[in-house]
Image (cartoon, rainbow, N blue to C red):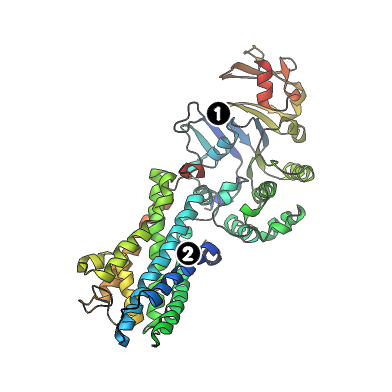
Amino acid sequence: MDPGRHPVAVLDVRGLEVRFPGAGAPALRGVDLHLNREKMVVVGSNGSGKTTLLRSVLGLVLPTSGSITLDGRDVGALRGATRVSTNLAEVYRLISLPVRDLAAVVARLKGGDLRELLARLHEFELDEVLGKRLFKLSTGQQKIVGDLFAVSFHPELVLLDEPFDNVDFSRRRRLVRLFQELPAAIVLNTHELELLRSFSGWSLSLLFEGHLLGPFSASDLDRLFLTRGAPPDALASMETSLGTFSVTRDAGDRPVKSATSLNALVEALT
Amino acid sequence: MNLVRSYTKAMLTNPSLWFWAVAFMAFWLAIGAFVESQGVGQGRSTILAYTTSWYAIIVLFSLSMLSVAISNSMTYGTSALVYAFRFTRLRPEGYLGSLVGGSAMLGGVLSFVLLGATTGMFEARFRVPLWPADPVGLVAVSLLAGVFFMTLSVTLVLIVINYLGLRSSSFVGFVPLLLTFTLGEAQLYVALPRWLIYASPFNDLASLLYQGFSGEPATLVLGSSSAVLDWVWLLTAIALWIGTLTASSLLLLRRVRARQLEEGRQI
């Protein structure tokens, strides 16, 4: 049986802790995440553990404790699960070739049609990059190419790390539309709270110092508050180096929507 | 699933590899042909032995540059390998097979180009025709040499990646080059024990290349009238080395760990 043919319906992360050698604090602490064919945006500041979370799900980081399963199968035991994809640039460094040839390699490895990816690159006015190697592209171009690699070839679970970094406004809008319309489960990391309005209908989780809070609904953004302490009506709470904080609905210390980043929000409360 | 064409293309279009594996080696061939050749006698057999010795060692040096390239490439691609083995159709066997195919092709191409450079320069210097006695055998040994250097470098770099961390990876790529220098060069000047020559893959390859070019059996000291080596044993030994290294590469590939590039920063 070809495991690549299995639909990837459920991502289940339980009690995930990641501690890097020599680092004082864990990068992720007891993270629980359950995704069932839905789209989720994870918001966190730089260094909060967003990328580590995605790298863990992909098996690029070994957990200190906890488990990660895709459709009930441990991620470490997966082979040929072609329906899972990501925009992380590091996974496309298999071979040093111009983008056109690299795209052909990725299409073959994913069992997809190269024309689909070439059409997307054309749609994003990136024909000029086809003859260049990835490292010769601008940071924004590299990011879009990674995004388009991730969403091509009919994925069922897409892990997107900061997909809008250094991407111009017009292409950001097109990427948002593409992610919205993609018939796949998505975990999208971003540090930009103001982007959340683009993702109404998606699940929302907040990541701070390795703690994952949520899920909430991105549509409820205007109703969510960050509150110092752990009031009884809190939706979720976390212990951080700066004290205990909670997410509350309709009332609290600071509205989440007012901040540009999660860090700014926490700093405003301390 | 294999990517032989892609890897062959990536190797053949790598300008750095061409510089170090061909241009830099051509420079040393020029030194051999026009500078160090002053004391070489005038008889054709002497000239042929001298030329062949240079060719055999230069091909090994050239292919050890391939080892450096492969080590570096794998160091940069650990996350890509882990991802590819889990979330694409690629398997460790297919990946290794692609590298074997690409390296064999490159071994053949490099050997052929260096053969042209060697005969061109040494014929110009000595005014004696120096075309190889067994071109087909020479190509076959060159393909084996490409595969040997690739499997050796993959084994070494994966030991570092999986168990030691990337800090050592910058250095391990040079191990094949250093061993080529130590063992390959030694056979030009010193009568190494027969068992050591048979056991050393670098000397097996140098001896087989010597025989393919000159048409004469290789000797303990290449190009001298010392004891003759048996090509069957040489070929058997290199086949065993390639088999062992291929198996170890595969085992290590199945356990490959994703490493962060910054781990490899030295200073």
The residue where tag 2 is placed is B20
In the drawing, does residue B216 fall left or right of residue A93?
A: left
In the drawing, does residue B61 fall left or right of residue A171?
A: left
Residue A262 image position (x, y, % from top left) = 67, 26
Residue A60 image position (x, y, % from top left) = 51, 42
Above or below A94: residue A16: above
Residue B201 picture quarter? bottom left
Above or below B132: residue B14: above
Residue B241 picture quarter? bottom left
Tell me whether the residue at label 2 lies in contact with that at label 1, contact meaning CB atoms closer than 8 angstroms: no
Query: Residue B173 versus residue B49: which sits nearer the camera?
Result: B49
Q: Which chain carries label 2?
A: B
Measured Cα–Cα span from mark 2 to mark 1:
49 Å
**Residue A170 disc label:** none
Q: What element carries label 2?
A: helix
The residue where tag 1 is placed is A31
Q: Identify residue type, mark 1.
A: Val
Query: Residue A30 versus residue B113: which sits nearer the camera?
Result: B113
Q: What element carries label 1?
A: strand
Query: Residue A133 versus residue A41: which sits nearer the camera?
Result: A133
Residue at the (47%, 54%) spot, across then down: B72
Residue B177 image position (x, y, % from top left) = 38, 60
Q: Can residue B246 be seen in this view?
A: no
Local packing at callout 2 (Cα closer than 10 Å; few below 14, some 14-19, many 20+) is: some
Q: Residue furthest right?
A: A170
